[in-house]
Image: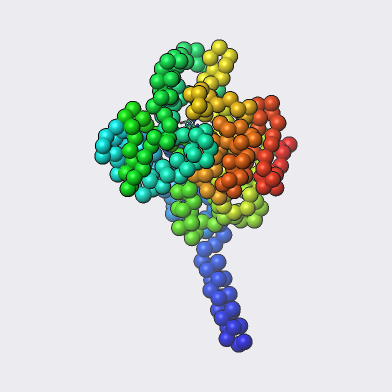
């Protein structure tokens, strides 16, 4: 009994000493761009040294930039995705890193679970629409829509069932290419999460990478994290707020994020692989909640294409929660989402 008390006492002293040494968490904030989107960070750290504390946000941005250069960019010659695409049609294929192999395998898995609604081989169609030149709210006077024949030709070069992965190698038929735009922000959130876990001075963080938000740990005042759900019909406003405890990933896909308007018709960036046209499933925005950033991001895109009914079933398969804002402004969500959601005032 005495031994037990001594042990508790000693560990108590050790804990309080540790608390003294670290001090109270202080907030560090930054806004930057990486992987083609805005990265907003708010991190709480007990690091006493001001310089060391604020270096963390820079390290995270640098990590994302390197991930883009080394792995995810379809544009940069240095990236694995670029080199996989370059290897299309060759017998040797491309030798994958373990990270990329996992990303591709998981993408194919979501592709088949969504019956093709999610497809990382849509690159020929995405490039034909020239989506990278679009920005939210841009009214493009001189944008020319793809010709139907060109669209059919591009579509004939898509279909993730034709991407083979064998013995760490990826094999794409000639003319095909992959585009990880639908999962890049979620992969980034997972990387950031691992980074935060490795730094014992960081007690809490809320970080957004475009439409994906990562929460981690806790705030010094112990109140929950508040993540706004954008109203896709009035994107300057929130339609609701999620109150979250600890680590979560929240990804949103919406028709307001990237689009062009031609003759009063909006063409947005989420493609229905069955038609090659922007998905029109009655949904204007989808928000997915999961512990896993890759999944939240992949599922938000897939659920946008599938629409509310089928999208809910897909999210359930992955134990993810989902919220749909339909084009008429009505909101439907899974039970688990209801528990953390409140309507914005
Ligand atoms: P997100 O904003 O996460 O929904 O991702 C949209 C991006 O993913 C687009 O800009 C395209 O690069 C790509 N994309 C578009 N439609 C699909 C789809 N059905 N499946 C997978 N990727 C897609
Ligand atoms: Mg996505």
Quadrant assignment for the N terminus: bottom right
Indicate the quadrant where residue 161 lies. Answer: top left
Image location of residue 111, percent across then percent down: 48, 38
Residue toward you, 81 or 229:
81
Indicate how the structure is coloured in the image: rainbow
Q: Is residue 236 visible?
A: no
Quadrant assignment for the C terminus: top right
Farthest bottom residue? 2
Rendered residue at 49%/59% (across/down): 201
**Left or right side of 8 for 125:** left
Image location of residue 160, percent across then percent down: 42, 35
Indicate the quadrant where residue 149 lies. Answer: top left
**Left or right side of 5 for 115:** left
Farthest right residue? 345
Rendered residue at 26%/37% (across/down): 91
Q: Can residue 15 be seen in this view?
A: yes
Rendered residue at 69%/28% (across/down): 329
Number of callouts in the render?
A: 0
Rendered residue at 61%/45% (across/down): 316
Image location of residue 121, percent across then percent down: 42, 32
**Left or right side of 180 for 207:** right
Image location of residue 24, percent across then percent down: 57, 59
Residue toward you, 299 or 221:
299
């Amino acid at each position: 009994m005495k031994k037990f008390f001594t042990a508790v006492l000693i560990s108590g002293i050790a804990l309080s000493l540790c608390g003294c040494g670290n001090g109270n968490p202080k907030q560090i904030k930054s806004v930057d761009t990486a992987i083609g989107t805005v990265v907003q960070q708010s991190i709480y750290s007990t690091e006493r040294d001001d310089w060391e504390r604020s270096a963390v946000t820079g390290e995270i941005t640098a990590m994302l930039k390197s991930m883009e250069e080394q792995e995810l960019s379809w544009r940069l010659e240095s990236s694995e995705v670029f080199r996989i695409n370059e290897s299309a049609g060759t017998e040797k294929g491309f030798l994958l890193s373990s990270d990329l192999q996992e990303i591709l395998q998981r993408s194919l898995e979501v592709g088949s679970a969504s019956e093709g609604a999610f497809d990382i081989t849509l690159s020929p169609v995405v490039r034909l629409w020239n989506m990278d030149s679009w920005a939210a709210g841009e009214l493009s006077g001189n944008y020319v829509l793809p010709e139907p024949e060109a669209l059919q030709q591009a579509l004939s070069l898509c279909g993730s069932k034709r991407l083979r992965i064998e013995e760490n190698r990826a094999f794409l038929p000639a003319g095909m290419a992959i585009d990880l735009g639908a999962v890049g922000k979620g992969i980034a959130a997972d990387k950031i999460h691992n980074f935060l876990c490795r730094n014992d001075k960081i007690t809490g963080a809320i970080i957004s990478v475009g439409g994906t938000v990562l929460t981690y740990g806790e705030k010094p005042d112990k109140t929950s994290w508040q993540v706004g759900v954008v109203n896709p019909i009035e994107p300057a406003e929130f339609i609701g707020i999620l109150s979250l405890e600890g680590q979560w990933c929240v990804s949103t896909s919406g028709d307001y994020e990237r689009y062009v308007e031609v003759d009063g018709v909006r063409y947005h960036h989420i493609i229905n692989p069955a038609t090659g046209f922007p998905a029109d499933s009655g949904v204007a925005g989808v928000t997915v909640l999961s512990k896993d950033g890759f999944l939240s991001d992949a599922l938000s895109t897939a659920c946008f294409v599938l629409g509310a009914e089928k999208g809910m079933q897909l999210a359930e398969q992955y134990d993810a929660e989902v919220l749909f804002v339909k084009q008429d402004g009505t909101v439907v969500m899974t039970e688990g989402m209801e528990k953390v959601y409140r309507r914005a005032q």
